[in-house]
Image (spheres, rainbow, N blue to C red):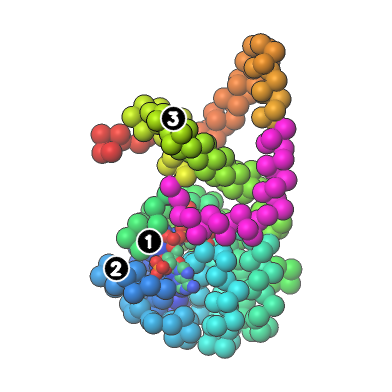
Amino acid sequence: MFERIAIIGMGLIGSSIAHGIRRSKLTSFIAGHTQSESSTKVAQSLGLADEMYPTPEHAVQDADLIILCTPVGTYESLTSQIVNSIKPGAILTDVGSVKKYVIDAVLPHLTQDIHFIPAHPIAGTEESGPASGFAELFDNRWCILTPPPNSNPKYINKLKSFWEAMGAKVEFMEAEHHDTVLAVTSHVPHLIAYTMVGTADHLRRISNFEVVQFSAAGFRDFTRIAASDPTMWRDVFLTNKESTLDILGRFTEELLALQRLIRTNDGEKLFEYFTETRNIRRGIVEAGQDTAIPNFGRDNSKK
Ligand code: NAP
């Protein structure tokens, strides 16, 4: 599909893309670059790229597809660093969890002959680094493309075909709409998980509360989410500020309403509320976005 693909940032997503490219034979040459020496060595030992380059400028040379797989906060400086090394006609894309900021940060640095098509695969785990990737990560998951106005349809279709070959289903959205949807489905839930785990940890410190020993399923799921990469999530909140704060405001209102129902012993309304939320869970399972197997299909015997 591409003669040469460059992957910048060999973490969970970058390494999973490398595995997926190999599985579907989408290029004959993967050029890689990642920041640290230690990750470069791991990427080399796993054969994630045909060659790992010491600088991003070297990695992108002659590539016809360049994929930025670093935390969103690095995109602007990385783009200005690589722009003069990108060959005319190449597609530049990314995997960032935020889209409006990415377009604002990257597009002004580009020349007209570089085709920038932002993308966001809705797939991940709480793991990070080059050893955490696997080819199946994107299978049957959505990948959202947010091409800026006036993007060339030929290149949009090529990137769509790329993600389909990686096993994903492709959807198109406007960048701002993407950021609001993801604030609801991913960003604010992560913030709530961070807060809940932080609250429990604070309690543990001040009163020797048995948080780890008696951690129940609900709290364990929060800790799994709260174990996600700190750099990536710091950047997500700082670059999707508006939507996060908007959804957080709505969340706070709902929380206060529930607080009132509990205080006033309104069991009927609480029951109605929880019945509706249970239906949402069923809808997600029916849409094939999660499994109905108890404990989300996780095998606790391995833990
Ligand atoms: P990750 O596992 O922490 O990997 C990030 C990689 O970027 C690391 O290999 C790191 O290199 C490298 N890096 C950081 N700064 C760099 C720089 N200036 N130049 C070159 N390499 C640099 O994170 P991830 O989960 O793959 O996330 C990467 C991107 O995917 C983020 O933009 C995130 O928003 C997006 N995303 C994440 C998920 C998810 O669930 N994790 C899902 C969808 C999209 P070193 O290891 O060498 O320091």
Residue 151 shows in the view: yes
Quadrant of image for the C terminus: top left
Q: Label 1's element?
A: loop
> Which of labels 3 and 2 is toward the front?
3
Q: Label 2's element?
A: helix
Q: Which residue is mark 2?
A: 42
Cβ of disc 1 within 8 Å of ligand 1?
A: yes
Residue 261 % position (x, y): 68, 18
Residue 268 % position (x, y): 66, 11
The amino acid beneath tag 3 is Ser
Q: Which residues are magenta?
A: 227-253
Q: Which mark is residue 129?
A: 1
> Which of labels 3 and 1 is toward the front?
3
> Magenta span has 273?
no
Image position of 38 (left or right of 161): left
Which of the two labelled residues, at mark 3 and mark 2, occupies the earlier sequence position?
2
**Residue sitting at 57 percent across and 71 percent down?**
75
Disc 1 + disc 2, Cβ < 8 Å:
yes
**Residue sitting at 34 percent across and 79 percent down?**
51
**Residue sitting at 52 percent across and 64 percent down?**
71
Q: Label 3's element?
A: helix
